[in-house]
Image (cartoon, rainbow, N blue to C red):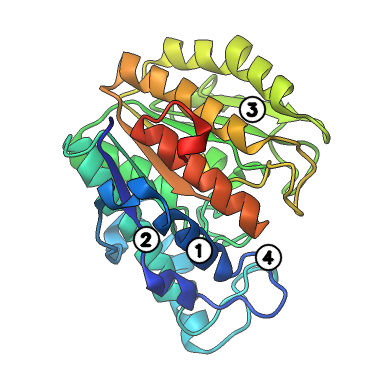
Amino acid sequence: MMKTAFASDPRFQNHATGQGHPERSSRLAHTLDHLQAKEWFASLKTVEAVRCETEWLARVHHRQLIERARASCEQGLPYLDTPDVAISAESFEVARLAAGTVLNLADEVAHGRVDNGFALVRPPGHHAEHNAALGFCLFNNIAIAARYLQDQHGLEKILIVDWDVHHGNGTQHLFEEDPSVFYVSTHQYPHYPGTGAYSETGTGAGKGATLNCPMNAGAGNETYTQAFTETILPAIDAFGPDMILISAGFDAHQADPLGSINLTTEHYAWMTRRLMECADHHCNGRILSVLEGGYDLDALALSVAVHIGTLKGFSSVEKS
């Protein structure tokens, strides 16, 4: 059995997005209820939620965005930067808590105290740009963690695999000139936010360190299996990461209302296992996984459970 860490906190539910918003607090409450009923849940190492220091936010975000987020929440504005980033009075602090909790979990994995870990946090992060909040995201949790692992832990090569149904434009843009961070994305295309064409492979020194695998609406397990087997896994082996980060959005699930991809719950176990094999081969099994999207409550809860159960080392989906 793998030693797996888990981080969440009731305060993540204090980021209020308003009536009818898909990125709602019940996503976490429902998922936690489902996880806590699992026999294996008590065996996860609990990692404390902590607030991210401004210096780490500022490693990937312009200080103007950080200040704008703080002021907008303080002033009670309804959204930050774009109408799809709904905010409330507590959203700035909750977003800092999300980013900081991911860093706390990163410490556990990087120090080898656990093999891998999953952060059940919100708001999500992968659409957040250097100086713009976008797509339900205030700060880019996974990007902040990548820089933190390089700066704080001396890891050189970071792999980010993003299997959210929406392309992580923010993560791609933050690292597109950087050959030390390899960004891989599977996503519905064309779909929000419109980026992520196969031709987008990075720029300058980062040319070749971005790999987009755009999927047509209606794609399912078979198409994803082919993309992983023929394209993604060989590219990961060629890169040789020091740690694997997963932008774990579960909205490519066949039940999700915000996408038109048809992955089954079991396929998240399959993709997780493939990345665990890569991690075993290249980086002592080190994986840090962070929640992004997933908007059907039952599909999200089931998929997260299968993902964590697989990280724990269960070979059958039923255990999850």
Q: Which residue is mark 2?
A: 8
Given residues 196 and 248, the one toward you in this image is 248
Q: Residue at x 20, y 33 (%)?
A: 154
Marks 2/1 in contact by CB < 8 Å: the verdict is yes
Residue 301 image offset from top left, x and y in percent: 55, 53
Identify which amino acid the numbered label 3 is placed on. Asn
Mark 2–mark 3 Cα distance, whole angstroms, equals 30 Å
Q: Residue at x 56, y 48 (%)?
A: 302
- N-terminal of the pair, mark 3 or mark 4, is 4
- N-terminal of the pair, mark 4 or mark 1, is 4
Mark 4–mark 1 Cα distance, whole angstroms, equals 12 Å
Identify which amino acid the numbered label 1 is placed on. Leu
Q: Which residue is mark 1?
A: 28
Q: Which mark is residue 212?
A: 3
In the shown orientation, is residue 222 left or right of residue 299?
right
Residue 287 image offset from top left, x and y in percent: 35, 33
- The secondary element bearing badge 4 is classed as loop
Given residues 126 and 50, the one toward you in this image is 50
Identify which amino acid the numbered label 4 is placed on. Pro
- N-terminal of the pair, mark 1 or mark 3, is 1
Mark 2–mark 1 Cα distance, whole angstroms, equals 9 Å
Mark 4 vs mark 1: in front:
1
Mark 1–mark 3 Cα distance, whole angstroms, equals 29 Å
Q: Residue at x 54, y 19 (%)?
A: 208
- The secondary element bearing badge 2 is classed as loop
- The secondary element bearing badge 3 is classed as strand
Residue 1's quadrant in the figure? top left
